[in-house]
Image (cartoon, helix red, strand yellow):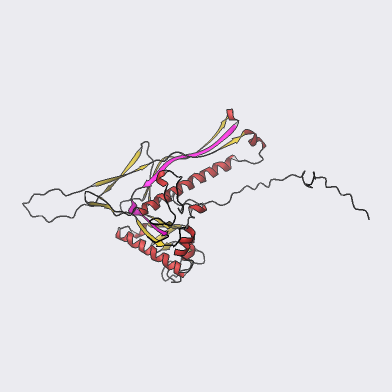
Amino acid sequence: MAAGNAIKFLGTGSDDEALALKTYLGHFSAAPRSSTFLWDKGLPGIERAMPGSGKSFQFLMEADVPEPEDFEPGDEVVGQQYAVDEGTITADKYLVAAKLIPQDQMHLSHFQILPRLAKAHKSKLERRYDRRLAITAALAARATTAVTKNGLSVHSGGNRVIRAGSSATSDTAVAAAYAASATGAANFRADLRTLGLAMDIDNIPVENRYAWATPWIRNVLLYDNTAQMFSEDYVDPETNRQQSRKITLVEGFKILGWPNATANGGPMPNENFTAELSKYNANFLPGTSVGTPVLLSLTGDMEGSAAVGVIEFEGIRHVVKYIQERLSWLVMSYMYCGCGVMNPYCAGSIEVSNTGT
């Protein structure tokens, strides 16, 4: 029998389907990105101000006054020493996310790109400042040197616990310090207790201790075999549930989230930042005197002190503008803010170094 003369009429050259059309399903999505954990959350450990104008912004810290003195009537009362110290916060440069879209592309496109870009810009700006806040919080915790003025104590500095990870690579060091095992869980809980004790000594109220830890730490804590974290004999079952991977209270710290490291698109710093603005450039690789944070804590005290201060001149704003001489649309989002360390004693961290010191 002769072969049928079936013609592949959609073909051109070697492509049998060259004339066929792609049909748009109307589905336009993006891969999941990191949430924000610190930015615009109204947290007690972050002080936010919206000044009208100014170059830098002062905050004051009162030093502890001397002990009262025994007094003999008839003697002269002389004034005792006292002191007030200051700190300042400055705004950063404008932070801008912008795209230029040629007009012919707008005509040719079969889907709407403008709404997608505005949403993406907003998310990117928020995540950038979330990272800057996390860096600032980590630097506050690292500021462990006590501050004095006129011989009086202003504050005792931030609180930082360091564990050896025996590697200069962040992931390797963290996995060595806190293995995915009962031992790793015990190590982390011991370090968190040490951090809690340091805050006790600083008179930080236990009910105001909020914390964020990495997903690796969340996984490690699920290996806890003491029953103390997941048994209703020790905790409210609505607080921690092992099979639901729900952990919200550990050693007095309220866990508010599990942010990814910066190398994975999250805000928790685990890199050596050298291309940021100078006040955010810092080394968070495991090394001597530096390390990778696996937990950050922000607290408030009885006077409303905060670890981090934020100055906000302009929140996120959006502009869509047609530029006729370019025959293009400008889609732009921007913000004008800045943050800095305020009261280090309201910050805490657990870091992994290569040496443990």
- The C terminus lies in which quarter of the figure? bottom left
Q: Residue furthest right?
A: 1
Q: Nearer the viewer, residue 330 or 246?
A: 330
Q: Indicate the position of residue 284 as horizontal and vertical percent values.
A: 43, 53
Q: Quadrant of the N terminus?
A: bottom right
The kind of secondary structure the magenta stretch mainly shows is: strand
- Of residues 189 and 168, which is closer to you in this image? 168
Judge left or right: residue 270 versus residue 18: left
| Count of numbered circles in the view | 0
- Quick one: which residue is furthest to the left in this view? 74
User: Which residue is painted at 42% across and 66% down in the image?
Assistant: 187
Q: Is residue 127 above or below residue 317?
A: below
**Could you say which quadrant of the image residue 115 lies in?**
top right
What residue sits 36% from the left and 54% below the top?
142
What's the magenta region?
Answer: 328-355
Where residue 170 sits in the image (x, y, percent)?
47, 57
Most foreground residue, 321 or 6: 6
Q: Is residue 227 above or below residue 340?
A: below
Percent x, y of residue 254: 41, 59
The x and y percentages for residue 34 are 51, 52
Observer able to see residue 127: yes
Q: Is residue 180 above or below residue 128?
A: below
Judge whether residue 300 can be spotted in this image: no
